Image: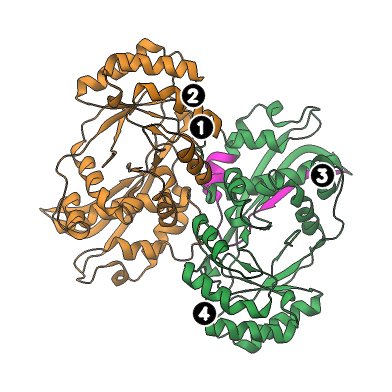
Chain colours: A orange, B green
Amino acid sequence: MVRIIDIRETTASMRADISNAYVNFSEMTTSVVAVVTDVVRDGRRVVGYGFNSNGRYAVGGLLRERFIPRIRHAAPEDLLDETGANLDPHRIWAVMMTGEKPGGHGERAVAVGTLDMALWDVVAKIAGRPLHRLLAERYRGGLADERVFVYAAGGYFQPGKGLAALQEEMRRYHDLGYTAVKMKIGGAPLADDLARIEAVLAIVGDGQALAVDANGRFDRDTALAYAEALAPYNLRWYEEAGDPSTTTSSRQWRRRTRHPWRPARTSSRCRTRATSSVMAGYAPIAISSNSTRSSATAWSNTCASWTCSARTSGRPGAASRTVATRWP
Amino acid sequence: MVRIIDIRETTASMRADISNAYVNFSEMTTSVVAVVTDVVRDGRRVVGYGFNSNGRYAVGGLLRERFIPRIRHAAPEDLLDETGANLDPHRIWAVMMTGEKPGGHGERAVAVGTLDMALWDVVAKIAGRPLHRLLAERYRGGLADERVFVYAAGGYFQPGKGLAALQEEMRRYHDLGYTAVKMKIGGAPLADDLARIEAVLAIVGDGQALAVDANGRFDRDTALAYAEALAPYNLRWYEEAGDPSTTTSSRQWRRRTRHPWRPARTSSRCRTRATSSVMAGYAPIAISSNSTRSSATAWSNTCASWTCSARTSGRPGAASRTVATRWP
């Protein structure tokens, strides 16, 4: 019978001198967790690792006060699958969410998702299978994607960063082998953003090699003004135009705009199963690494790809690498 | 120039042997904050107090790591109104939310709302005005409600609590002077809940003296089954039938059901301004004490009533007292 013998968590600094449309990363932190089991494989103790994507800060308080203690205090057999030979992330999710009110898409989902990531990691390691194959076997009839689309997410706003520095950054991604990049918009006026976009297009060539991300900055009118202005560039996608809570405005937007893209609802809005089901009606979903919970259950089909990406994109680079799967 | 000289926070146990449809309160905690100023009134230092309503646990980690430090590190003049003689909760809210991504309705809004409550408390004390009058003057042309509707929120599920104990509890509220009570449903099968409701109606008499709260427990079919079964009782309201994230199902429900009530969207769903504006289209909003942020800004009209309630309902009782203002 597998047992979790320890769960460790720590807060790591993600300090960087960059900004998106909302967040300055000078104080940014992330939670890192390790789920330690009593299983030994190839002479090494099996440990699962998880972290939360940057942008929402560490969630150490929640991990220490609620979610880790609930796993610790559970009967060990309540954490296992029916064979007893491996952990069951679904049953552990139920343990973690015991005593939790419905609703609340922010820190709580980040904390649970961080542990969920580590749990799926450890389950795959105990099973001796790459996680993308294990998930494909369980949820997708064994069909795993061996190749996934990855892109370099960068183009942040930085003090004194001009167009030349932006182009230099994008050239670096290109030299690393990326065929597509994403840049932040919304931290500058529209005209400036258009100049930034044109500068990047001069490097990457085709609009389909560039995506933009407003990080939820815009009200509806600004979002539409950007949509109009961006249309001629034929960009890959235009992400998080408005506040993630405003499904209504997104729906109106879809009705009003005739642009080639539909509003992209990203993982940052899809952190609960309820929200995921609401959002699923709206648009394609870009699954990124902070949506473990969604991807591991509601989005298990795409999760296989996400996981594959995590395993294939380990090369250190200046930008984090996320994956948009099955983008139309 | 007013200065905040300290902000203290602590976690208080709210441990109780009760449950609603989702949460067992045996581990429940709440954050309590005190905003200490350098102002002295009537020989006493002016301090504002806030706490978060029970059901969602303390948020000490977020308070200590993000929101209190941001206020502490801000330039003192950035926290003041234009006179410099009082604090400005709106400006302080902007300071607290610096570097925060949009979206995230759970713990973050609770943490900010807890501080927001203390800030409005201190602003009123510095102004030497009851808060309900101060808010009415600022946001409602001076029209303050001197009387508000209050009800006793109880009827929780407890081990071994039978109908007689439930009736005894409700009789106690009645003896305390309450003209309306609220009870939890959804922690038992429908038939059992109906027996509980009928037992309480035998005490309170009229259906308009009883509200029920499912705490977001039901899926759509169960919510509708309850709605059908509850209709003959002509209850005051039926609160949080489904998951707060599923606006779509709520909308469908409104379309499908012809019952006298509309789904009540409570404060637990209205913790960000964006959500509030989405929810405002749906139904009357019950403002409870954990929605300080919403009530203080988007819902300032109702907040005057909420505040009045906080000032008039100080009598200790077995149940927390919340206020439904302007219920149709």
Q: Which residue is mark 3?
A: B140
Q: Which class describes the residues within 10 Å of circle 4: few (<14), some (14-19), or many (20+)? A: some
Cα distance in 3D space between marks 2 and 4? 51 Å
What element does badge 3 sit on? Answer: loop
Q: Which residue is mark 2?
A: A187
Parent chain of label 2: A
Q: Is residue B316 left or right of residue B220?
A: right
Cα distance in 3D space between marks 3 and 1? 30 Å
Q: Are the numbered discs 3 and 1 placed on the same chain, yes or no?
A: no
Start and end of the magenta stretch?
A: B43-67
Q: Are the numbered discs 1 and 4 placed on the same chain, yes or no?
A: no
Q: Which residue is mark 4?
A: B188
Parent chain of label 1: A
Parent chain of label 3: B
For marks 4 and 3, the one nearer the N-term is 3
Residue B28 visible in this rendered orientation of the protein: no
What element does badge 4 sit on? Answer: loop
Let me know if residue B54 is in the magenta part.
yes
Q: Are the numbered discs 3 and 2 placed on the same chain, yes or no?
A: no
The answer to whether the residues at label 2 and label 4 have Cβ atoms under 8 Å apart is no
